[in-house]
């Protein structure tokens, strides 16, 4: 923290910070930052810690730490005003967030990023890359049966057949959901089945877990299984998108995962050849 301004203070975000936060976000991602859209919800969410970083009474940075599963916190919304970058502010804010999560007894902090600058920052802070995610897209298709939804009892029993499926190790035990990456395992399959977010292929030989979509799509967070059963499941998701009036299916898949062949064979295209999106984790 050597280069940190001495008088940096972190405090809870307030409604009165809104204009300043919008100003800070204006030059992030060519003005397409999502923070302005979620600011009010984040402010209202007492279950998470949404913080403003101040120097001499002026907000120069923001961040949020959100508990999202037992023992797990999600780090998000890190922004430093463009006038104040490269002074170690992000590093100091982030270190404080880690210390707080540790003090509160959390087991692990996870986050998602695609920004190479932030990747350097997080790796220097000891975070490990858990998933190198790519996005595939398959358009809605008319005329077939939507995928089957296993009940929670069946879901829990599906995991032993999946935990050694090809490419599963590329998930490093986490579901690459960019709103909060949970542990991948039997308990997660059960949870997803309970909320109607799990789909199974023929004979339970392939499964996918859904996540909350960002747009007009059916969004898949992870894929397990292989061959014909997986291809059939991937096709049935395209039928489901059609039945639900959604434009397409989006699938998050780790780089070099063998299911890429099954996606291509089921009419899906790689949607982000250029950019990278990663899930990182730090044991606290
Ligand atoms: C990423 C961001 C938060 C960094 O804030 P910052 O206060 O400038 O970061 P710091 O000064 O604490 O930098 C810490 C380290 O991060 C890395 N880093 C930060 N900005 C960098 C840049 N422009 N180029 C290369 N490395 C960079 C460096 O390793 C740096 O250490 P160093 O200065 O000793 O080389 C800021 O640039 C920002 O708000 N960007 C836009 C929003 C964004 O992408 N947020 C992250 C989303 S997960």
Image (cartoon, rainbow, N blue to C red):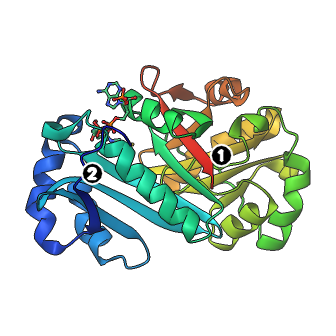
Q: Residue at x 60, y 63 (%)?
A: 72
Residue 260 in picture, x, y percent from top left: 66, 26
Image quadrant in which the C terminus is located: bottom right
* Apparent side of residue 119 relative to residue 204 in the rendered image (left or right): left
The circle on residue 34 is: 2
Q: Earlier in the sequence, mark 1 or mark 2?
A: 2
User: Is residue 137 in view?
Assistant: no
* Element under disc 1: strand
Closer to the camera in the image, 11 or 139: 11
Could you give the CA–CA distance between mark 1 and mark 2, rounded to whole angstroms?
A: 24 Å
Mark 1 closeness class: few <14, some 14–19, many ≥20 residues within 10 Å: many
Residue highlighted by disc 1: 222
Mark 2 closeness class: few <14, some 14–19, many ≥20 residues within 10 Å: few
Residue 3 in picture, x, y percent from top left: 31, 37
Closer to the camera in the image, 55 or 16: 55
Image quadrant in which the N terminus is located: top left
User: Is residue 11 in view?
Assistant: yes
* Element under disc 2: loop
């Amino acid at each position: 923290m050597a280069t940190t301004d001495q008088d940096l203070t972190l405090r809870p975000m307030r409604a009165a910070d809104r204009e300043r936060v919008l100003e800070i976000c204006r030059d992030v991602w060519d003005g397409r930052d999502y923070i302005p859209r979620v600011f009010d919800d984040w402010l209202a969410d007492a279950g998470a810690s949404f913080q403003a970083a101040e120097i001499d009474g002026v907000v120069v940075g923001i961040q949020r730490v959100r508990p999202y599963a037992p023992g797990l916190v999600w780090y998000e919304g890190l922004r430093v005003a463009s006038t104040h970058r490269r002074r170690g502010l992000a590093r100091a804010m982030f270190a404080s967030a880690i210390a707080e999560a540790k003090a509160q007894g959390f087991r692990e902090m996870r986050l998602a990023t695609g920004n190479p600058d932030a990747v350097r920052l997080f790796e220097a802070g000891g975070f490990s890359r858990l998933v190198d995610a790519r996005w595939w897209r398959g358009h809605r298709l008319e005329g077939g049966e939507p995928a089957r939804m296993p009940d929670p009892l069946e879901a829990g029993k599906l995991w032993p057949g999946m935990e050694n499926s090809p490419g599963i190790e590329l998930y490093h035990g986490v579901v690459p959901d960019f709103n909060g990456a949970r542990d991948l395992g039997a308990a997660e399959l059960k949870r997803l089945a309970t909320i109607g977010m799990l789909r199974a292929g023929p004979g339970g030989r392939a499964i996918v877990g859904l996540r909350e979509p960002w747009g007009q799509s059916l969004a898949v967070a992870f894929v397990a299984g292989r061959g014909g059963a997986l291809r059939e499941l991937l096709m049935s998701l395209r039928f489901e998108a059609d039945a639900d009036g959604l434009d397409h299916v989006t699938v998050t898949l780790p780089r070099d995962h063998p299911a890429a062949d099954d996606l291509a064979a089921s009419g899906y295209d790689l949607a982000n050849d250029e950019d990278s999106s990663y899930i990182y984790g730090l044991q606290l």
